[in-house]
Image: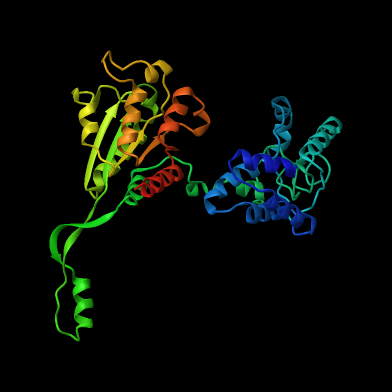
Amino acid sequence: MLLTLLYNLRAQGLKVGAGEWLAFLRGVEQGLVEDLDGLYFLARAVLVHTEAHYDAFDVAFTATFEGVELPPKLKDDLAAWLAEAKQATGERVHHDFDSLEAMRQELEKRLQEQKERHDGGGYWVGTGGTSPFGNSGRADQGIRIGGEGGGRSAVQVAGDRRWAGYRTDLTLGTRDFKTALTTLRKFGREGEEKLDLDGTIDKTAKNAGEIELDIRKERINRVKLVLLMDTGGSMEPHTQLVSRLFTAAKELKTFKSFEAWHFHNAPYGFLYKDYRTFDRTPTAQVLEKLTPQHRCVWVGDASMAPWELFQGAGWGEPGPTGIQWLQRFAQRCPASVWLNPDPARYWDHPTVRAIGALIPMFPLTLDGLRRAMSRLRTVA
């Protein structure tokens, strides 16, 4: 059963190392765990690195230890017995099963023997009591059938998903985008000359009280941001998410310059301000104005028919192919990233791989956006 927990943790993306897993097993062997609640807290303390992963841990824990479901027919047969649950009182009772499979086999055995309703016992399927099968009882582990849990077991706590808001692999709101984009700021004194009050106080203090003004140029964010967004087709499901990113970048007003362009699948002969009004500019003109100081943020699923990227110039327009345009942009603006709204498990596609090899690709999640912005800051 514990090995199943390890597999479920890794399936949720938690990087549980061999040393951590062995430390957890040693804790279990040394008696640090007396029940499922203790197992939950020990595992979370040893195996989880950050609170951002608590929700993924809860999902894995629930998948491992939550009670199995009975076949529908058996549920119907037992419903009348279990509808009016009698609540149990007293301390919880331990049942020692080697695995979920052993628990399931024991339940099937008792169901074959049981002929009537049972409450308050320790063996039959029923309510109250200490039996591991039924509901509203005091067993520390078992298979719940009907009813609602009242003991707040570890499985119930994990099932509440209280930590879902801490995850970094979730989609983002406008505020999240603003926070991440703000980290791109790179200030330089390029504006109008103004009185620096803090500098004036510091100089005056060092000058024995003789007032000495500190006049400096205003600090201005030097970053020039270019946002290029795939529109239409397979990007339709992600329209709201991309719109939030566009809104955040537009509302920040902290960049030295900001431009936003639209394209479909890949940039071809034209980039668009607005597809609806056909407001477009030749891609060559946009590219010509870019410099190594620009930060290019591409947004798209990068998924299309291979010929659309490697052969066609798009929309019947003559000129370079989509991949050739992307190569030119990458050469012109080394500080470029690609944000992909599709989960990474869908990235094993010829065009996604080709674009990812050319422009560093990150998932359009909070964690992915942070890593993308970090990448942009490291490029000169």
Q: Report the label total.
A: 0
Quadrant of the image occupied by residue 193:
bottom left
Q: Is residue 242 above or below residue 209?
A: above
Q: Nearer the viewer, residue 58 or 139?
A: 58
Q: Could one spot residue 173 in this view of the protein?
A: yes
Residue 169 percent coordinates (x, y): 48, 42
Q: Nearer the viewer, residue 11 or 229?
A: 229
Colour option used? rainbow
Q: Is residue 166 above or below residue 206?
A: above
Q: Nearer the viewer, residue 107 or 32?
A: 32
Residue at the (60%, 42%) spot, across then down: 59
Quadrant of the image occupied by residue 304:
top left
- Outermost top residue: 316
Residue at the (28%, 15%) spot, across then down: 315
Quadrant of the image occupied by residue 81:
top right
Residue 257 percent coordinates (x, y): 21, 44
Residue at the (54%, 53%) spot, across then down: 51
- Outermost right residue: 113
Q: Could one spot residue 65 in this view of the protein?
A: no
Left or right: where 85 falls relative to 116: left
Left or right: where 314 falls relative to 143: left
Residue 180 percent coordinates (x, y): 36, 48
Q: Nearer the viewer, residue 157 or 372?
A: 372
Residue 245 percent coordinates (x, y): 33, 39
- Outermost bottom residue: 208
| Quadrant of the drawing holding the N terminus | top right
